Every structure is written in structure tokens, then in C-alpha cells.
Image: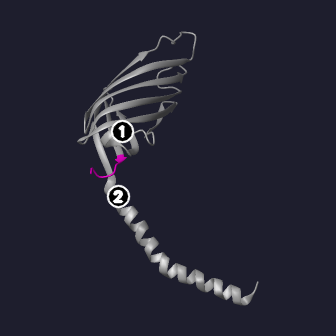
Amino acid sequence: MNVKFAIGFSAVCLYAFLTIGPAAQQTVAAQQNMTSDMRHTAKGSFDVKATPTQNASAESPFSERILDKQYHGDLEGSAKGQMLAWGTGAKGSTGVYIALEQVTGTLQGRKGTFVLQHSGSMLNGVPQLDVKVVPGSGTDQLAGIGGSMNIIIAPDGKHSYEFQYTLAPAP
């Protein structure tokens, strides 16, 4: 490599780092501050009714259900969804489910809809659950929403949620 070229190239890189670096660092810091300002937590309870579909069969290890939910608390509204599950049949044993639900309501004062994607499994009575907002599914005042929901089932069977989400400040 030509020495003059290498020295010149290094000087250009150093100049770019010194002049562009701080601006890029400020942009990253501003994005981090904006992201932390947009993080919210919503909590409450919900009621769920899971109705088997007409496709349900005693011979099949799969179960299809229509979901009808009512959310209470920081999220007030309803949801309609569909679930597909498989399990060994023994209570607290092994199983898996996937589901989609469209939530319609008011989230801490902002109205709109969004879709939640569920993926859950249980192995030897130990559950794993992942519930996330489908990117781009938010509408109206909930456009741009993202996040994940933790579902808590109490020993008495009552359901509650903790919803960690991001959303741009209201205009």
C-alpha cells in the first residue's frame, strides 16, 4: 500500500471520527433518552373465555379455541383471538400453544387496537410464555406500539397482566 495514501486515509478517518463521532454519540444518547421516556408499564386483570371450535375432535391431540377477553385496569377493553394447542392431556404435564388476539380499547388514556402474539409451552409443569405486540399492528392513538405482556395466573385461577410497552408521546 502506498504510504502517502495510508497516511492520508488515516487522517481522513481521524477527522471523520473527531467531527462526526460526537454528533453520532449525541444522536445515540438522544435516542436512548427518547426510548427510556417512551417505556411504560400497564397493570390490571383480565377475564378470558376459551371456547372450543367446531374443528375440535376427541381423536386429535390438537385443540382449537376461540378467545374472548375483557381487560381491566390500565388497559380497558376487549380482545378476540384464536388459539391452537397440543398437550399430553395430563394436568400440569407437557404442552404447547400459539395464539393471536386483537385488543381493542384504551391503554392509559389512548384508544386504538393492536395484536398480541402468544407462544407458550409447559414441560413437567414448568411454564414458559412469550406474549409480544405484533410490530406495525397498532392503530389510531396506539399506532407504533411495541412491547411484551407478562400473564400471571394466581393459585385461585384469576388472571392478571403486566404490560411493558413503548409508545411515542401523544401529539
Q: How many marks?
A: 2
Quadrant location of the N terminus in the rendered image: bottom right
Callout 2 secondary element: helix
Residue marked by disc 1 = 139
* Mark sitting on residue 36: 2
> Residue type at mark 1?
Thr
Q: Residue 8: horizontal and vertical position, in percent?
A: 64, 87
Q: Residue 72: horizontal and vertical position, in percent?
A: 25, 32
Q: Main secondary structure of the magenta part?
A: loop
Residue 143 falls in image quadrant: top left
Residue 59 falls left or right of residue 54: right
Label 1, residues with CA under 10 Å away: few <14, some 14-19, many ≥20: some
Give the label, 2 or 1, closer to the camera.
1
* Alpha-carbon span between mark 2 and mark 1: 22 Å
- Is 166 part of what is drawn in magenta? yes
User: What span is in magenta?
Assistant: 165-171
> Residue type at mark 2?
Ser
Label 2, residues with CA under 10 Å away: few <14, some 14-19, many ≥20: few
Q: Residue 37: horizontal and vertical position, in percent?
A: 31, 57
